[in-house]
Image: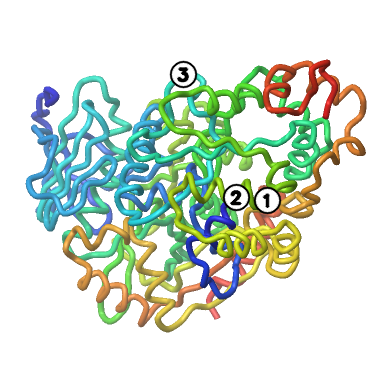
Amino acid sequence: MTQPVQPTSTFHGHRSFGLTLNLPLHFPAMTSSQGPFDVEVRYGAVPDTLTEPVYVGPFHQLRPECAIFKLDDRLKFMIERGNLITIDRSGEIDDGSVRLFLTNQAIATLLHQRGQLAFHGAAVHDGQEAIILAGHSGIGKSTFAKNLIKRGWHFWTDEIAAVAQKNGRSVVYRGPAELQLWENTLRHFSLDQAGLETVREGLGKYLVPESIEQDADWLNIRAIVLIDQHNTAQYCSRILGGVEKIARLGLQTYRGEMVGPMGIRNRHLGEVGAVAANVELMEYSFYRGWDHYDQAVDALEKLILPD
Amino acid sequence: MRIFLRLLVEPGLPELDLDQVGWSIFSGRKSLDSTGIIKTADLTNEELLTYRTKAQVIWSDQAGGPSFRKVHDAYRDQFGRVQFSPIATRLAICIVRNPLDIASSLSNHYGLPVQHGVDQLNQTAGGVMIKTPNARSQLPQYYGDWSAHTTSWLDQTDLPVLLIRYEDMKRKPFETFAAVAHRSGIAASSNDILKAIEGSSFQRLKALEEQQGFSEKPPHAQSFFRAGKVGGWRDELNEEQVHSIIRQHHSTMQRLGYLDQTGEPL
């Protein structure tokens, strides 16, 4: 077991993903908050293995109400009961890595434990409602979001879109105010990487600060767009319905495949069904590569504008 | 080969959909990500090496029968590290093809001039080829030049290897594919093998691509299945391109029967 970094005497209250978090490290991209806290995040010892795990993955172990994520001996997380995250870090790991795995894997797992959906996607809004851009890793969700922001849309969240039901509508909570963009995407947008932080040491992906420009904590969702790429035509779109809609939505959460071992399969299905009942789901495929990217965003924007 | 194996394992497959063949590429992010709560795009190359080896063991445990993965990587990466789990691998089927024919095929794949394919085989830019770390849908992969790549598989001793020459798949298909079935542990009759060979013939796959499209075709390529011809290089490569490939890969080409004793192409 690694020697945990001595807990800091200063804790930082932050609000993101609909949660008020008491964090042992400052998170500049999150809104500050005084509490009361929904989630306690602390430094401490995390075991290498979970007692009676239901699933053992490459870097993690799962059972209902508890998950361990072990990157290596430098960084481990334990996520428990939807309200506690323990971080076991050695001095060798950078803060960026801790923040990244906290806000991606750990928070997503915790949201599932709390009975909320954590979609893997970015979201933008038009001042009224939000659009979630979902899809598998590397498909270009954050890049589409950046492109829409350049066209006047507003940033709302990146990587994790925390979704819940409020007043009979599906809503998405604001995330940390930064986009994660790869180096070649920065070049596409003529953004200078000088002065930008990498998301973590050793990774050519950068944190691009964004302004949220909205006081609300959550926004109604107008549509969820499942982005995909293909090689046969410029772009095509299709509205999904019925069982296909629920099945496809269920696989967009972070990670839909893991809800069984987490013991939340039925609850997850219910939550996904609730979203399917009041949010339009659109599959949107575009021609791979940068050459047609701007036209692809043009076409998508027309589809997501309000009627 | 992947489609032959799919048809052999599932002989009752009603309609063949090229995009639903499965057993996708080993380096595909989508299948690696679905093995857990991690997102491989958040991992460094060092961490990915550990992750993918562990994922391979999980896939193997979950497979419940013969399971295959397409692999472009060399057996070892540029630092000499093994990239595959010996525990989770029953057999490496190493498919080789005359590099003179690969040159134009590879160029077509990327929609670029033939010289591009020659340069890739020879790795004249520095001896390694690594897809960019954020290659959209796939992990970074280390290939090495053609000879280094081929011998990395043939000369390793951790895994059993079955060497298959593309040319033999065309010239003596039954014998070649039957060996694949046998060594893969698939119990198949001669009739099953013949049917799977027919179902995965180049002409059929080319026709299917024309009807259905194929997601593995790169955007700039005319088609994924191009000519499939043995010896097409004689019409497609110029003298200097032929010589540069032979110069660099003489020993491996001779070892695999692509050059005669005097170094002339066969």
Q: Amino acid at mark 3?
A: Gly
Quote the CA–CA distance across marks 1 and 2: 6 Å
Q: Chain of mark 3?
A: B
Q: Position of residue B67 (x, y in %)?
A: 43, 52
- Tell me whether marks 3 and 1 sit on the same chain: yes
Q: Label 3 crowding class (10 Å Cα cut-off): few <14, some 14-19, many 20+?
A: few
Answer whether labels 3 and 2 touch (C-beta < 8 Å): no
Q: Residue furthest front?
A: B190
Q: Label 2 crowding class (10 Å Cα cut-off): few <14, some 14-19, many 20+?
A: many
Q: Position of residue B35 (x, y in %)?
A: 33, 50
For label 1, the SS is: helix
Quote the CA–CA distance across marks 3 and 2: 32 Å
Q: Amino acid at mark 1?
A: Pro
For label 3, the SS is: loop
Q: Amino acid at mark 2?
A: Phe
Instruction: Looking at the picture, tell me which residue is in the foreground, A216 or B88.
Output: B88
Q: Chain of mark 1?
A: B
Q: Nearer the viewer, mark 3 or mark 1?
A: 1
Q: Chain of mark 2?
A: B
Q: Residue at x 70, y 36 (%)?
A: B97
For label 2, the SS is: helix
> Where does label 1 land, which residue?
B173
> Where does label 2 land, which residue?
B177
Q: Position of residue A69 (x, y in %)?
A: 22, 41
Q: Residue at x 70, y 47 (%)?
A: B172
> Where does label 3 land, which residue?
B80
- The answer to which of marks 3 and 2 sits earlier in the sequence is 3
Quote the CA–CA distance across marks 3 and 1: 35 Å
Instruction: Looking at the picture, tell me which residue is in the foreground, B102 or B185.
Output: B185
Answer whether labels 1 and 2 touch (C-beta < 8 Å): yes
